[in-house]
Image (tube, rainbow, N blue to C red):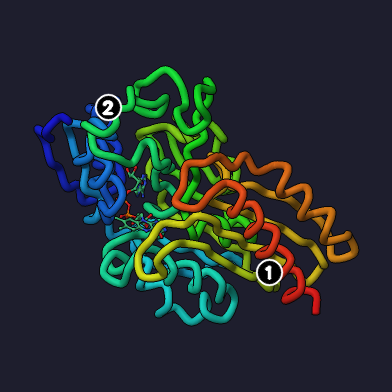
Amino acid sequence: MTAEKTYIKPATVTEALRIANEHSNDFCYVAGGTDILVNKYQGNKECSCLIDITGLAELKTISIAGDQLKIGALVRLDELKKHEVIAIKFPALLIAAQEVASPMLRKTATIGGNILCENRCSFYNQSEWWREAIGYCLKCDGDVCIATGGKKACFSKFVSDTAPVLISAGAMIELQDIDGVKIIPLETIYTGDGVKPRNIPDTAILTNIILPLNHDFNIVFKKLRPREAVDFTSLTTAVSLNEKGDIKIVIGGVDPKPVVVEGTAKGIPEDYIKKALAKSRVVDNDFYSRKYRREMMRLFLEQSFEELLK
Ligand SMILES: Cc1cc2nc3c(=O)[nH]c(=O)nc-3n(C[C@H](O)[C@H](O)[C@H](O)COP(=O)(O)OP(=O)(O)OC[C@H]3O[C@@H](n4cnc5c(N)ncnc54)[C@H](O)[C@@H]3O)c2cc1C
């Protein structure tokens, strides 16, 4: 583990980007710090410069622009519930946010940090000596995936609880980098490679999450975890149905990226469930067994369809 040599707290996005570009490859943005700092002090993430972005006031607001709801990346998970439009249009987002970690963490953790939080695996989220004792895995400079008994791909699981709901509602994200602003669908940033689970440039700052207000969504959210009070997900499902009859299933906790299956209310739920199960590369890297999580996935999706289509 490298000790940080520099801690900088910029006041604007432009300043943060300039500093990041000066420290390319050796810095971390810190929002709430509830994910990045744990990874850093456990030796899973090296960086000698911490750029604390909590001073970027422009990323802390929730606003409506035409038919879009813009949620600033630095809005804390616990603050989402104060916004009436979110409560009316996207109640499932509030449920998902309230299921993240524990009350104290939710008062610090941001929504931007949540959708960018690191993938997890029971062979990776361990102390340095533990990882050394098993010969290190692919995600921390080893040569094979230990969870799968030696595969040359990393199956660390995607664990954000808010991202499945956001993707099921067609969320876009706004990214700002030194060369300008980009708006892209949230679901496209996840690579499926557990070693490098996101494809956005390291220096880019997530500024806003954008949700459409011109659709009516009914979204069912479910989460499986050992202890309700604090644990990361073992399985998260979000299934949305909009006013046009479009269905979107998004699953977390069972693959290096969110598993997405789309359909319509006229389709056969069992077909969609089979497709979701086939797409999920669940491995034994969690408190619960692979078999149990697959069974629970089927159950959660069946229950979600029942609730949505009744
Ligand atoms: C005990 C415990 C339990 C937890 N349980 C859950 C859980 O149940 N569900 C869950 O989803 N998470 C859980 N977490 C993980 C974490 O708390 C949340 O994901 C949290 O929302 C992360 O937000 P943060 O602001 O603290 O992110 P940070 O830790 O500050 O950042 C996370 C990552 O995002 C990057 N980042 C943050 N903001 C930006 C931005 N605006 N632009 C560019 N990069 C950015 C950081 O550089 C870092 O790589 C848990 C953590 C702990 C310690």
Name the kind of residue labelled 2 in the image: Ala
The image position of residue 243, as x and y in percent, is 78, 72
Mark 1, other Cα within 10 Å: few <14 / some 14–19 / many ≥20 = few
In the displayed structure, does residue 9 sit left or right of residue 56?
Answer: left
Q: Nearer the viewer, mark 1 or mark 2?
A: 2
Q: Residue at x 41, y 43 (%)?
A: 120
Give the mark nearer the N terminus: 1 vs 2: 2
Q: Is residue 150 above or below residue 221?
A: above
Residue 22 shows up from this direction: yes
Name the kind of residue labelled 1 in the image: Asn
Q: Is residue 220 above or below residue 131?
A: below
Q: Residue at x 27, y 54 (%)?
A: 34
Indicate yes or no: mark 2 CB to ligand 1 under 8 Å. no
The image position of residue 8, as x and y in percent, is 15, 42
* Residue to which mark 2 is pinned: 133
> Residue 301 is drawn in which quadrant?
bottom right
Query: Which element type, helix, strand or loop, lies under badge 1?
Result: loop
Q: What is the quadrant of the N terminus in the image?
A: top left
Q: Residue at x 27, y 56 (%)?
A: 32
Label placed on residue 116: none
Distance from the alpha carbon under mark 1 to that under mark 2: 54 Å
Q: Residue at x 15, y 29 (%)?
A: 2
The image position of residue 105, as x and y in percent, is 29, 64
Residue nearest the viewer, comparing 105 with 217: 105
Label placed on residue 214: 1
Query: Which element type, helix, strand or loop, lies under badge 2?
Result: helix
In the displayed structure, does residue 294 sit left or right of residue 61?
Answer: right
Mark 2, other Cα within 10 Å: few <14 / some 14–19 / many ≥20 = few
Residue 189 shows up from this direction: no
